[in-house]
Amino acid sequence: MVLKHNVLATAVASVCLGMCAVANAGTAPLASQQQDTQTTSSSNTKTDNNGKSDKTTDKRQPQKMAAVQVNGFVSSIENSTALKRNANTIVEAVSAEQVGKLPGVSIADTLGRLPGLAVQTVDGRPQVLTIHGLGPDFSTALINGGQQVSTNNNRDVAFDQYPSSWFDNVVVHLSPEANLIGQGLAGTVDMHTIRPLDKSGPEAAVNAKYIGNSMSELSPGKGVSNHGYNVNGVWVSQFADHTIGVTLGVDLENNPSQIEHQAPWGYPTDSNGDYVIGGSKNYGITDSMKRNGFLATVQWQPNEFYTGTIDITADNFKEVQQAKGMELPLGYGPDGMTYLTPGTVSRGFVENGTYDHVNPVIRNDFNSTTARVYNFNWDNKFHINENWSADLDGNYSRATRRDVNLESYSGTGYYYGPNAYYKVDPVTGNGSVTGSPHAPSGSFGFNELGNGMLYVDPSMNYGSGMVLTDPQGWGAGNKVVQEGFINAPHTVDYLANLRLSVERDFVSGPFSSLQFGASYATRNKTYNIDQNFLTLGGGSFSATNTPVLSAPFSGSSCAPLAWMGIGSMQCYNPFSLIANGTLTEVPVFMSSLPLPPNWKVRERDLNPYVQLNIDTYLGGISLRGNVGMQVDHTNQTSTGERVAPGSDVTGGHTDLIPVSGGTSYTRYLPSANLIFGLTDNDDLRFSAARTIAQPRMDQMNASQNVSGNITHLGSTDPNQAFFSSNGGNAKLLPTKADNYNISYEHYFSGPASGYQCNSADQKNSDLCRSGGGGGYFAVSGYFLELSDYIDPNASYLYDFSAFVPSYLTPAQAATLGTTQGIVSGPTNDGHGYVKGAQVTLNLPFNLIAQPLDGFGVILTGNRTKSSLVYGNNPSPITVPGLSKWVANGTLYYQHAGFEARISDSYRSSFLGEVSGISSSRIEQTLNGGSTYDAQVSYSFEHGSFKGLTLIATGSNLSNKIFTTYQNNDPRQTQTWERYGRTYSLGVSYKFQ
C-alpha cells in the first residue's frame, strides 16, 4: 500500500535523475528570457518556426515581414493553436479575434467548445464548466494568475459573471506544473487580460449588439424584458517612449431569456402499480441579467530590470426573474390517488388521465440576485541580472451576493375552509389546525408528451375570483396562514494572496532554469440566509385566535402557462401587497432545511514550491518541460449554529448556540511535464501529477441539528446512542487525484492565412512564435485515480459532550451510556477513477486543396468513463458531472472580410446540480443532447468604413429542451425547461 502511494513521487524523481544522466546527450545554451510562469504559454523558451528550441542567442534574428493582423475567427484559431503548441504543459486555449472580442457568446460558451470541456446551462445561459468529466468542484479559475472567489455558496465559479471583452486569451491547464498556484484537481482556467506594453502601438475597439429571444415575454413585470443589449469598449495605449501602458475597458450588458419551466413533484404508483405524475410546479419565467463591468490595467517598465503591472476589475451583476405560474397537487396532494382516472398506460407509466378535486396553488413569484466581484492584482517583475529574476505578486479578490426569492400564493380559498380554527387535544395538550375542506375545486386532464412536457386541461377558469390565501395549508404546522415565503441568502467571499518566486537561469545542462518560491493565501467565506413567512396578518393560530384566512386582491389577467394548456390566471405584484400592509412578514428559521444554514469558513494556505525547467535533446529528439514539487499546507476552521432545545423556530425568537470545528493538513504535490519533439511537426506530451480539490465550503459547515432519543439514554453503542445529528463536517480533507495525461500532436505545415509577422511581433503573438498556422491533429488519454473523495451522504462519529447540559438533567446525565453519537454528514470515504480519451482535428481546408482556402473545420470527441465507490458499498456509481460522450464541431469560412461559422456542441446525459427548495442545491440526472449556434459577419477592409464589422449571431438554434429525470427513466421528468432561440445583431468598430 505504501508502494502504491509513492509510485507518483518515485516517477517524478526518476525523471529528474534521468535528466541529469543525459546532460551530455544534448546540451543547448542559455534560453531566452522566460515569460511569467503563469502566462499564456507557460513556456520558458522561445521556439523557431519548426517548434525547436533556439538557445544559441537571447533573441532570434528578426524576420522582415509585414505586421501581424490579429483579426477574425481564423486568426483566433491560429493563435489558440500556437498557445497550445508553445505551452510546457498540456493545455487547451482560446484567443481573441481582435482586441476585446473573444469568439463565442460568453466565456462559458467559448470554454465549452474546447476539447475535454463541457458546460451546463443555467437559466438559458452556459454557466457551469466541467473538465474531463469532473464538475466545478474540481476546477479553479484565475485572472492573470490570481485565484478567483465565488458568488455561490461554494467554490465553483459562474463563468458568465465575467465579460468576455476583458480577455485577450484564456488557457485551460489540463496538467499542472509546480509553479501553478491555485491549481484545480481536474484543471485550471486562467483568464488573461490585455497587457498594453505587449502591444506594438495603441489599439481600441467598440462593440455593440441587440439581443432578442424567439419566445414572447412570458411574465412581464418590473426589471425584466424580452429585449437586451451588450455594449463594450476597450482602449489600449502606451506613453513615455513605450515605458507606460494603459488598458481601459467597459462592458454593459442586459441579457434577456424566457423560460418555460416545469418541476414535477415525483411519480407515485397507482392502485395498479403504475407510475403516474404526482404533482408539478409550473412557471412562465421572464429573466433579465444585467451586468456592468470595468477593467483597468497600468504597466510601467522604466528599464530592462523592472516591470510593474496593476490590474483592477469590477463587475456589478444583477439578475431579475418574474416567475408566474401554478403548482398542481395531484397524486401527492391531500387526496392521493382517490380521484385519479388513468388513461393510456405504457410500460408501467400512466401517459394520460384525469385528476378530480384539485385545488391548485397560483404563484406570483419574484427572484433576484445582486452580485459584485472585485479583483486587484499588483505584479512586480525584477530582472536582476542575466541569470537571476524574481516576481513579487499580490492579489485580492472579493465577491458579495444577495438573493431575494419571494413566493406569493393565491387560490380558490383556504385549505381548511372558511371556519378553520385551532383545536387542542384535551388529553395530550397538543393542538392542530382543523376545519372543513373548502370549495370549489376542479379537475385537470393531463397528458405526458414525448419530449417530457406535462400538458394539462383544467376545468375551471382561474382568471378571476381568486383570493390571497394558503391553498394547501402549508403553514399549518407553524400555526400560520402561509400566503407566501421569502428566502434571502447573503454570501461574502474574499481571498488575499501574496506570492514570491525566484528564477535562476542556467547557461548549459539539461535544465534551462530553476524556479522556487512560496505563496500565502487567506480566504474567508460567510453564508447567511434570512427566511420569512408571508401571512395575511391577525397573528397565528392558537386556542383563542384565528388569523386572517384569505383576502381579496386586484390584479391583471395574464397567461404565463398558455404553452402547457392553462389559460388566463390572476397576476399581481407581491411587493405592492407588502408595502400596503396586506401581506405581513413573520420570521422563521431553518424552514425546509436539514440543519442551520448560517456558517463561516476560514482558510489559511501556504504553498512553497520548486521547479526545474527542462530544455535539452535526447539524441535527435528535443525535450522540454519541467519537474517539480508543490506543498499545500492548509489550516481550516468553520463556525456554525445549532438550535437550542425547545426553542421556537417561528416568530424571530429562535435561540441559537455557536458551533465550531476545523483541522489542518499538508499535501505534497509532485508534477512532471515532458514534451518530446519527435519531428518538426510532431510532439509527444506526457504529464504526471498529484492534484487536490479542497472540500465544498457548504459541506464544511460546522452547524448541527442535534436530536436526543430518550429510549437510548443508557445505550453504550454510538450507533444506538441518545445523541444523533445531521450536520456538515468541519474536518473534511481535500479530494486527491493522481493525474496522468498523454497526448500526441501533429501540426500540419501550412500558411497562417496570409498573416505574417515582423520582429516586434515575435514576442507579442503566439501565432508568430509558432511560425504560422496550418491546424493540427491530436489524440490524448487521461487517467485520474481518486481517493479521499467526499461522500455527501455518509456519517461519522462525533463527541456530543458539549451538548449534555442543554439536553439532559443532572439525573439523566448520570445514566447516559455514552456521549458519542452519529452525525449524518459528509466524509472522505470515497475512491474511484476517471479515465478517457479524446481526439481533436483542426483542419484548414486549404491543406486539402487551394480552392478551398478560407474553409475549415474543428472537430473534437471525448469518451470518458468513471467509477466511484463510497465507503464499504461495493456498488460503484458515476462521478457527478460526468458525461460519457462530449463532442464539438465547428465549420467555418473566412474570406475577404466575410465570415460564417456554425457549431454543434453535444454531451450525453450526466448527473448535475440544479436549484432545490430554500435555495439549496440538489443532484439530478440531466438529459444530454446537442446545441447549435451560428454566426455571420462582414468586415470592411477598405474605404471609409474600414475597421467596421457587422455581425449576426444565433444561439440554441435547435431550441434544445433542458430536462432532468429519475430512476434512469426519461419519462419520469424532474425538471423540464425550454428557453427559445436567442438572436443578436451587432456592430464592431476597431479604430485604425
Image: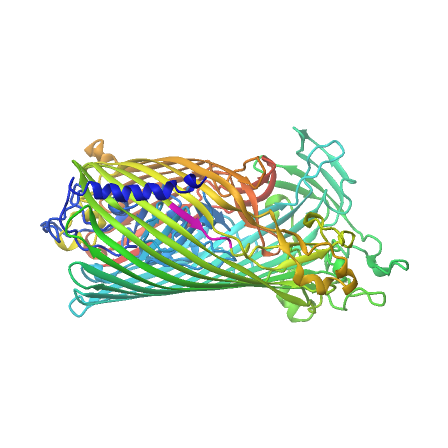
Image coordinates for residue 650, horizontal then vertical, percent: 71, 65
- Tell me how many marks there are: 0
Residue at the right extreme of this rendering: 426
Q: Is residue 693 in the magenta section?
A: yes
Query: Relative to residue 579, is residue 546 drawn left or right?
Result: right
Query: Relative to residue 495, is residue 402 drawn left or right?
Result: right
Residue at the image point whose x is 40% and y is 55% from the top: 632
Q: Up-down: is 802 above or below 950?
A: below
Query: Relative to residue 647, is residue 375 drawn left or right?
Result: left
The C terminus lies in quadrant: bottom left
Residue at the top extreme of this rendering: 347
Residue at the image point whose x is 68% and y is 48% from the top: 719
Of 908 and 560, nearer the camera is 908
Image coordinates for residue 512, horizontal then vertical, percent: 20, 50
Q: Is residue 157 in the magenta section?
A: no
Residue 808 appears in which quarter of the rendering? bottom right
Q: Which residues are magenta?
A: 690-696
Image coordinates for residue 96, horizontal then vertical, percent: 29, 52
Image coordinates for residue 501, horizontal then vertical, percent: 29, 60
Q: How is the image coloured?
A: rainbow
Q: Up-down: is 14 above or below 764?
A: above
Say if residue 507 shows up in the picture.
Answer: yes
Residue at the image point whose x is 28% and y is 55% from the top: 37
Say if residue 313 shows up in the picture.
Answer: no
Of 658 and 84, nearer the camera is 658
